[in-house]
Image (tube, grey):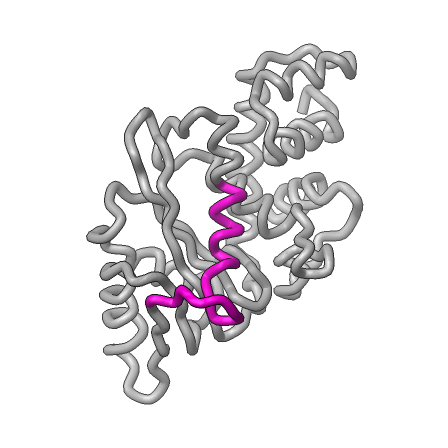
Amino acid sequence: MKASPQIITSALQLYFTGESLRNTQKFLELQGVKVTHKTVWNWIRKYTNLMEKYLEKITPQVSDKWRTDELYLRIKGDRKYLYAMMDDETRFWIAKQVANTKYTQDVRPMFQKSVKVAGKKPKVLISDGARNFQTAHKKEWYSRYKEEQTVHIRHVHFKGDMNNNKMERLNGELRDREKVMRGLKKDDSPIILGMQIFHNYIRSHMGLNNETPADRAGIKINGNNKWLTLIQNAKMSL
């Protein structure tokens, strides 16, 4: 890396906590580092992909109750939907899927990916009333299992432990990030991947006593600079 690891990880931290590419560039210039905003973007793309390959080898210890929801995003000016699967207990963001439609998109690939990541399926799934969640649940986690079928809780709107507020908080994180980006540019943007890594491994959550979802899921990322630890671990695993 031409720039120091500290500079690169500082850029990642700034960007995924809400700064734009150009504001991140300006901050680095104040530290005596002259880079273009395109260089910052290249760092994001390179290192999120590197971390993803490493993190795919690790199985999070999640609970048996998961939540799923969708959030609409702007990609090249078009409305897209980001579907997310999250563990209820650890708030670990298990899997994602970008789609064109809200109610009719086949979200079974996300359900399948979730099982691959977690090494199991949940005993309980909580979602809104969207029909595609119901269809994916029935085909992936109900019809195939005779003895251990996943219970699906839908239309949960009342206040209390069984609502979908935890997913709404995740939606809020993504919505704040999207405002700075002024719309994502493509479906497989490394920004979405980076937000997932940031949510799971970097950002401490007040609802988790200032731990990360990864901490709660039994994945310890040591050191004060967790971006650097992840990148170093990813390089050593190649």
Total marks in image = 0
Please determine whether, in this image, residue 128 is positioned above or below residue 18.
Answer: below
Residue at (66% x, 27% y) in the render: 11
Q: Where is residue 97 in the image (x, y as percent from the top left)?
A: 36, 48
Q: In which quarter of the image is the N terminus?
A: top right
| Image position of 213 (left or right of 187) | right
208 magenta-colored: no
Please determine whether, in this image, residue 141 is positioned above or below residue 208.
Answer: below
Please determine whether, in this image, residue 115 is positioned above or below residue 144.
Answer: above
| Image position of 178 (left or right of 5) | left
**Between 145 and 53, the one nearer to me in the picture:** 145
| Image position of 24 (left or right of 70) | right
Residue at (53% x, 41% y) in the render: 195
Q: Position of residue 222 (x, y in %)?
A: 76, 52
Residue at (48% x, 38% y) in the render: 175
Q: Where is residue 44 in the image (x, y as percent from the top left)?
A: 55, 30
Which residue appears farthest toward the bottom when viewing the image? 147
Q: Quadrant of residue 24?
A: top right
Q: Position of residue 75 (x, y in %)?
A: 35, 30
Q: Quadrant of residue 227?
A: top right
Residue at (60% x, 31% y) in the render: 18
Q: In which quarter of the image is the C terminus?
A: top right
| Image position of 92 (left or right of 187) | right
Identify the magenta region: 155-174
**Between 160 and 145, the one nearer to me in the picture:** 160
**Between 56 and 129, the one nearer to me in the picture:** 129
160 magenta-colored: yes
